[in-house]
Image (tube, rainbow, N blue to C red):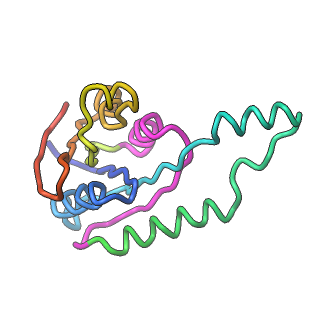
């Protein structure tokens, strides 16, 4: 399989850093990597307050977006390797946004960290990785575990 583009979503955790390190080692300088941070959407409470006041509050200040972009720039700058990294900041539901960006950018592979939650915790909190694996238009490699050691699981 020949890859043209890789997508690496990040929440700035060590799991995300490990996923980016794996992707950059794999891609070298041949394959561009989109590094995506998805900021959370406006909260339901905020939407209710908007309705109560009968006017929308600013959904996001320019400072919030600039902060996310700055954090992502630092995250990308601290990565190793000669990979061609393209930082992206989006706002929305994490899993839906990751899948949408994968489609829009033509990603051939998604590499992401996972918290490896199981059972009741996953049922209550949901799993972004699981939803991405289920809906992604391309293969997804998840790097999981509770410690910064390397374990690979390929999903297609």
Snapshot quadrant of residue 30: bottom left
Quarter occupied by residue 21: bottom left
Inspect the magenta stretch and tell me whether residue 103 lies in it: yes
User: In the image shown, does 33 or 16 lie closer to the viewer?
Assistant: 16
The residue positioned 21% from the left and 43% from the top of the image is: 142
Relative side of 155 to 107, left or right: left
Q: Using the image, determine if residue 86 lies above or below residue 107.
A: below
Residues 122 and 20: in front is 122
Q: Which residue shows up at 23% across the image and 67% down it?
A: 29
Residue 118 in which image quadrant: top left
Residue most extreme to the right = 54
Residue occupying the point 26% across, 48% down: 111
Residue 31 forms part of the magenta stretch? no
In the image: residue 13, left or right of residue 144: right
Q: Position of residue 34 (x, y in %)?
A: 37, 55
Q: Nearer the viewer, residue 14 or 146?
A: 146
Note whether 37 is above or below 71 in the view shown.
above
Mark count: 0
**In what quadrant of the picture does the C terminus appear?**
top left
Across and down, in percent, residue 150 comes to 11, 54
Q: Residue 38: horizontal and vertical position, in percent?
A: 48, 49
Question: What span is in magenta?
Answer: 80-106
Instruction: Residue at 48%, 67% (x, y): give it.
Output: 71
Q: Is residue 147 above or below residue 106?
A: below
Residue 46 horizontal/vertical position (percent): 71, 39
Q: Looking at the figure, which quarter contains the N terminus?
A: top left
- 90 on left or right of 98: right
Residue situated furthest front in the rendering: 120
């Amino acid at each position: 399989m020949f890859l043209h583009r890789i997508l690496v979503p990040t929440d700035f955790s060590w799991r995300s850093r490990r996923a980016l390190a794996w992707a950059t080692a794999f891609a070298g300088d041949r394959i561009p990597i989109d590094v995506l941070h998805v900021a959370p959407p406006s909260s339901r409470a905020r939407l209710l307050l908007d309705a109560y006041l009968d006017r929308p509050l600013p959904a996001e200040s320019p400072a919030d977006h600039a902060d996310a972009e700055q954090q992502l720039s630092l995250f990308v700058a601290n990565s190793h390797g000669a990979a061609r990294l393209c930082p992206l900041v989006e706002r929305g539901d994490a899993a839906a946004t990751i899948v949408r960006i994968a489609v829009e950018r033509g990603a051939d592979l998604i590499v992401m960290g996972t918290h490896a939650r199981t059972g009741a915790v996953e049922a209550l909190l949901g799993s972004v990785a699981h939803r991405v694996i289920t809906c992604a238009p391309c293969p997804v490699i998840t790097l999981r575990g509770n410690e910064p050691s390397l374990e690979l699981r390929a999903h297609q």
